[in-house]
Image: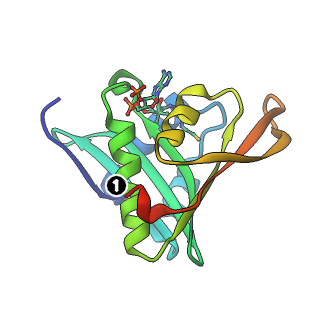
Amino acid sequence: MNTLRFVPFAEQHVADVVRIDHACQSKPWSEAAVRLELERPEGVFLVALVDGEVAGFAGAWMVLDEAHVINVAVDPPRQRNRIGERMIAALLQECHKKGATCATLEVRAGNEPAIALYKKFGFRDVARRRGYYIDNKEDAVVMWCDALAEVV
Ligand SMILES: CC(C)(COP(=O)(O)OP(=O)(O)OC[C@H]1O[C@@H](n2cnc3c(N)ncnc32)[C@H](O)[C@@H]1OP(=O)(O)O)[C@@H](O)C(=O)NCCC(=O)NCCS
């Protein structure tokens, strides 16, 4: 990998974000849903660029002093190169700058890579929503990071 940088999500990234989301998620966002994130006032949405190419994305919504992480994905051929880890760090830093003191997210109970990644940032399991994901009735694990200042 040569240069990795993070930029705010913009119109020119829409097609790649849709492509990566479809490659990574069993219930991907529609293009219209992706476009909504371009204009959401409470949104913090970053795109990872490797040598100028979109390699992943991460988004959160600011709810009072909480950062709600809504989606994170790395293009499958580029996974396991620390892009996800550096992207979460950048996202949480940005949310912290905007006033977030804590962060939360929900993740499929069987998504071990994502759960392991979030634990590296101090997220811990706090609740379980049984059968939350309608495609396969998988449980959602709700995770919280209580002290964002300590991990960014
Ligand atoms: C989760 C995801 C974003 C991780 O991105 P990545 O760039 O491949 O991850 P990184 O290389 O930065 O790895 C960072 C840490 O994540 C965890 N991790 C990543 N991939 C893993 C895997 N296949 N198995 C176990 N742990 C994994 C590990 O803790 C790893 O740290 P380590 O290498 O010191 O053990 C990526 O797998 C992905 O896009 N998955 C599909 C979409 C998704 O599930 N998003 C989360 C929705 S809640």
Q: Nearer the viewer, residue 120 or 133?
A: 120
Q: Quadrant of the C terminus?
A: bottom left
State the image coordinates of residue 59 (x, y, percent, origin top left): 48, 55
Residue at 84% of width from left, 32% of height from top?
A: 137
Q: Which residue is mark 1?
A: 90
Instruction: Please indicate, yes or no, whether residue 14 appears anywhere in the rendered image.
Output: no
The kind of residue on which mark 1 rests is: Ala
Q: Is residue 1 above or below residue 102?
A: above
Q: Nearer the viewer, residue 27 or 132?
A: 132
Q: Is residue 111 left or right of residue 128?
A: left
State the image coordinates of residue 24 (x, y, percent, origin top left): 52, 30
Q: Is residue 125 above or below residue 102?
A: above
Asked which secondary structure carries label 1, the reply is: helix
State the image coordinates of residue 143 (x, y, percent, origin top left): 65, 49
Instruction: Please indicate, yes or no, whether residue 75 appears anywhere in the rendered image.
Output: yes
Q: Is residue 68 above or below residue 17?
A: below
Q: Is residue 54 left or right of residue 112?
A: left
Instruction: Count neighbours of disc 1 (C-alpha within 10 A) and say few if under 14, some if 14 to 19, many if 20 or more.
Output: some
Q: Residue furthest right?
A: 130
Quarter occupied by residue 29? top right
Residue at 42% of width from left, 44% of height from top?
A: 17
Number of marks: 1
Residue at 52% of width from left, 60% of height from top?
A: 60
Residue at 34% of width from left, 50% of height from top?
A: 47
